[in-house]
Structures are given as structure tokens and as C-alpha cells.
Amino acid sequence: MIRKEYRLKEKRDFGRVYRKGKFLSNRYFVIYYLRHPGPAYRIGFSVSRKLGKAVRRNRSKRRLREICRRHAEIFPNGYDYVFIARTDFAALDFFEAEALLLRQMARVRSFIEAKEAGRQEAKNAAGKGSPGPAAGEKQGGQAG
């Protein structure tokens, strides 16, 4: 079971990830992701009624949860993730679903790492723009 602090439960949180987040998709599922201020990652799951009756939908969610639980290390902290199972997802066996999800999460991680690297470069560039006084210089007055 995924611990409480790692779950995305509230409708407003799902809505925020859908509205403001980025996503990657394939034939079997969609992964939405969005940065959030907390230190840990949070995961939510959504399965449409198009996938089938409750038993089939719940089985698909259980599979997604179990894959995420087994591979918790693949989720960068500080992000919310929403997994949406598409109708073809129910036809996959567990190991196919696991392989596809891991491949898709590797892509998500690469996008996140690239964005974080860009953010770090911008932060470093902003710090180098106006250097402070050199060693031995006085600041804001006449040199004595």
C-alpha cells in the first residue's frame, strides 16, 4: 500500500495537475506531472468507466498502485503524478504494464531533470550577473 503522505486524493489536487501540469501518453495510459512545494512526491490514479465495470476498473488501479509501490525510487520528489488508465490497459498482463510504465516514467524523469538543470543554470546565471566587491575593496564609499 502506498503511504498516506504519498497519495493524491482531493479533487482540487487532481484538477490542478490536469490544468497546470505536463503530460506524456501512450496507447495504454497517460501520466500527468506537476511540481508542488512539498518535499515528497504524491501519486493519484484515475480510471474511466469506459474501461469496464467496477471489477475491471479496480483491478487496473490495483495494478498501477502495485507497480508504483514496487518502483517508488523512480519518482522524483517534489512532484505530483496522476496516472490515467486507458481502455487498452486492462488487456495488458502485469509485467507488460510494468515495463511500459517504467519506460514512460524514464521519459518523465528525463524531462524533469532537464527542467531542473535549466532552472539551476538560470539560478546560477542570476547570481553571477552582479558580483560583489572584490577582495580588499570597500563597498559603497570612497576608497581610503
Image (cartoon, rainbow, N blue to C red):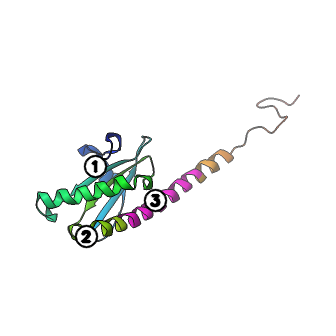
* Label 3: which secondary element: helix
Label 2 SS: loop
Query: Is residue 111 among the parts visible in the rendering?
Result: yes
Secondary structure beneath label 1: helix
Gap in angstroms between the C-alphas marked 1 and 3: 20 Å
Residue 48 appears left or right of 110? left
Q: Which region is colored magenta?
A: 101-120
Q: Which residue sits at x=77%, y=32%? A: 139
Kindly identify the residue that appears in the image at 73 percent across and 39 percent down.
132
Q: Earlier in the sequence, mark 1 or mark 2?
A: 1
* The image quarter in which residue 57 lies: bottom left
Query: Where 10 sits versus 89, above or below?
Result: above
The residue type indicated by label 2 comes to Leu
Query: Which of labels 1 and 2 is toward the front?
Result: 2
Query: Residue 111: x and y, percent?
Result: 47, 61
In the picture of the structure, the residue carrying the numbered disc 3 is 109
At horizontal 18% and vertical 56% (from top left) the residue drawn is: 58
Residue bearing the label numbered 2: 92
Instruction: Determine the main secondary structure of the stretch shown in magenta.
Output: helix
Quarter of the image for residue 25 reads bottom left
Q: Earlier in the sequence, mark 1 or mark 3?
A: 1
Task: Check disc 1 and report the residue beneath it.
Answer: 14
